[in-house]
Amino acid sequence: MPEHDVDWAALRDAAVTAMEQAYAPYSKFPVGAAALTEDGRIVSGCNVENASYGVTLCAECALVGQLHLTGGGRLAAFYCVDGQGNVLMPCGRCRQLLYEFRAPGMQLMTTQGIKTMDQVLPDAFGPENLEETT
Ligand code: THU
């Protein structure tokens, strides 16, 4: 999807709305994530923490769950925000989560402007590696 076809303001709004539903009593760091699918849906998610801290689900976990619940497909553009609505970089684990479901040329809003998935997770391990024979 070309850059000019992405409504970044709408994606940010969806990410902020998701962030407002976050369950983050331990870190007090609510996160919201939203993505545009190739077929034009917006999917979103918030972080959900746990008293067993390591069990915490990042916002992106809920987002990829919603992607599948609402019909699957691929992610064309992604926006993540912190509690102030500022752009937040997805953590390393979540870059991997997003990589699995990227559309070709997937774009992400970053603190340095719009980047591609390949820029934020270069030389990634992905499904294609599992098909390699040894
Ligand atoms: N968090 C996310 O939801 N996504 C990220 O990509 C970075 C971190 C959450 C996890 C935890 O609830 C809080 O931010 C503080 O680490």
Image: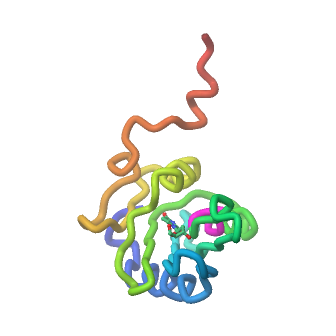
Residue 33, placed above or below residue 14: above
Question: Residue 54: x, y in percent?
Answer: 64, 58
Is the image coloured rainbow, by chain, by secondary structure, or in one colour?
A: rainbow
* Residue at screen point 48% across, 53% down: 95
Q: Which residues are magenta?
A: 60-64
Question: Residue 35: x, y in percent?
Answer: 52, 70
* Residue at screen point 70% across, 70% down: 51
Using the image as rendered, state which of residue 5 and residue 74 is in the foreground.
Answer: 74
Residue 29, placed above or below residue 101: below
Question: Residue 99: x, y in percent?
Answer: 51, 49
Q: Main secondary structure of the magenta part?
A: helix
Q: Is 63 covered by the magenta stretch?
A: yes
Using the image as rendered, state which of residue 35 and residue 23 is in the foreground.
Answer: 23
**Residue 115, picture quadrant:** bottom left
Question: Does residue 3 appear left or right of residue 14 in this picture?
Answer: left
Using the image as rendered, state which of residue 57 and residue 16 is in the foreground.
Answer: 57
Question: Residue 107: x, y in percent?
Answer: 39, 60
Question: Does residue 78 appear left or right of residue 109 in this picture?
Answer: right
Q: Residue furthest left?
A: 112
Residue 22, placed above or below residue 72: below
Q: Quadrant of the N terminus?
A: bottom left
